[in-house]
Amino acid sequence: MNNRSAIICLVTTLAASALCAQAPVTLNVEVSRPKSAVSPMLYGLMTEEINYSYDGGLYAELVRNRTFRSDWTGILNWFVIEKGTASAKVTVDAKDGPSAALPNSARLEVTRADANSPAGLLNEGYWGIAVRPNSRYTGSLFAKSDSPGPLPVRIALVADQSGQVLAKASVAVSGSAWKEYKFEMQSGTVAASSENHLEMTIDRPATLWLQLVSLFPPTYKSRPNGNRIDIMEKLAAMHPAFLRFPGGNYLEGGRIDTRFDWKKMIGPLVDRPTHPTTWSYHSTDGMGLLEYLEWCEDLHMQPLLAIYGGYSLGGQVVKPGPDLDPYVQEGLEEIEYVTGGTGTKWGAVRARDGHPAPFQLRYVEIGNEDSFDRAKTYDGRYAQFYKAIKAKYPNLQVIATMPVNGITPDIIDDHYYKREQGMFEEARHYDNTGRNGPKIFVGEWATREGTPTPNFGAALGDAAFMTGMERNSDVVIMSAYAPLFVNVNPGGMQWSSDLIGYDALNSYGSPSYYAQVMFASCLGDETVESNVSGGGDKFFYSVTASKGTKVCLKLVNAASAAQPLAITLGGLGAGTHTAQLDMLKANTTWATNTITNPNRIVPARSKLTVKGGRLEQVLPPYSIQVLAIDLK
Ligand code: AHR
């Protein structure tokens, strides 16, 4: 595989162009000679709040800045409405809010308004608000007023351009004490669009205080406070075995006090203070610890819980020893929240939050990318967490974010972010890794070419890298691409080359996404003996099998010329076997999918017959194939 193979070009006089093909490759596979185990956990997901992954992304909340944060320009994402002769102003009331976590509110003072001249507030949503036909929207808000009687507050989803009211509701705010109000509204036969906003208006002079104004569309599996259906369906198609959360840098925070402080991200939303993230925007924390776990539950993924390990991205470190003890305790309690029965302190809190049944947990990770810790304290910090966790939860596998001295971690998390060429080289990274050390979790990896989402060259780098992980899956037991999501609107992205892109209305998979869907769709439980001759340095393959059931061949031709390939499948016998071929290909490495052209590069499926254990294929230029041969 190391030599660039000869390319033979036939110049066609008619077309005055060249049809090029590489020298043929011969691939011999011994179907019934197992070589090494393949981990059923190999393909999972990694996620954190980055690129508007949850807020303005997976987390289906439609109202942006529902807690009325402000800067010198005023309350962010909210604007005053004064229709007709109405007069109103909005300020932040820093001293009056519905809870200790949300001690402030928006104070809307309407001095002139009537039925024809209402006044109120407008929310712009996350680059618009998606409204679909015949859909139910579920909302809630906290409010109080100085009005002597009930104050009707009209709420509407309104089309930006036409002003058409697409759905509406009303709540009667009564009294000067904070109360929660709930409402529902229904759209009719409108065209799906994201060029819409939310309006909340009153039709008389009054002062209205508002906090935590929330609106959800239908969510995946109808979960309250749930996730976007289109994005969850895309994730489901990847058949992920686990979810690594909550980061990434988001776990660490810029400072210790902006870490993923899980206790502030559970329970009713009104008790969640929200916090600044490492990725230059503020998190609503609507995606809290239980929501991550329910996301796992919905997609049948195992949680891989990353615990804050005492290092924050800005360089703050908690020294191992007594200083670290409270953080170790916080981690143990987090594990209890996830796994404890309702008789335990934190298991009971989880039950109070709506999930009495404990979650299964096998993997925890201590920190993230601790090789950046200039004080070099990870050996001590990891050991302290490891001993405390193993003492209470001996069955948990404790992942380290870098090699550790003094203690042998169960698993080490390796990260790879490279260009296409770099990932081709990394495809062989684990071929010579010792098999007696810790297992490897490739907790973040991506070929970084293309923005906001990877192009086809990146998909080729990814596919090549995946063949290497599959070949070595006895040691590489888990892997996850990162980042998973990006909101493609201007300002939505902090990190380029992200697997799945979206705006308020639509989402799409990058070529890299489809490569992963294809690879995960056929994963045997063992690699089998194979050898190849004649392939150049842009040909990659892996072969796995499940005894008596299937053989999975992954074939990658990253060259610009076609690759003829003769495959022999020893052990298949003289008969015929059906096979399913999924192929992803493009004309250039720069070809890609976008939010407006989401289906340029999608897998094409066809059927093949393998006769007498032989198969001849020509891999098109720039192509990725997954061939599933039925052994039954
Ligand atoms: O995936 C983006 C970032 O890359 C992660 O937050 C961090 O762990 C890595 O450096």
Image (tube, grey):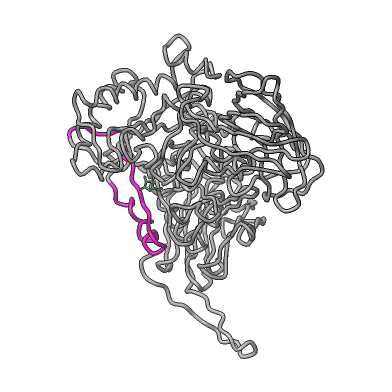
- Quadrant including the C terminus: top right
The residue shown at (30%, 42%) is: 313
Give the magenta-colored segment's residue range.
406-433
Q: Depth check: 412 or 367 in front?
A: 367
Point out the residue furthest to the right here: 189
The residue shown at (50%, 31%) is: 93
Residue 439 rendering spot, x and y as whole percentages: 33, 39
Residue 16 drawn above or below residue 323: below
Residue 280 drawn above or below residue 241: below
Q: Is residue 477 visible?
A: no
Residue 30 drawn above or below residue 424: above
Location of residue 5 (image quadrant):
bottom left
Residue 492 rendering spot, x and y as whole percentages: 51, 51
The residue shown at (82%, 44%) is: 189
Q: Depth check: 509 or 276 in front?
A: 276
| Left or right: 191, with 267 as reference point | right
Examine the structure image and report whether residue 130 is included in the region drawn in magenta.
no
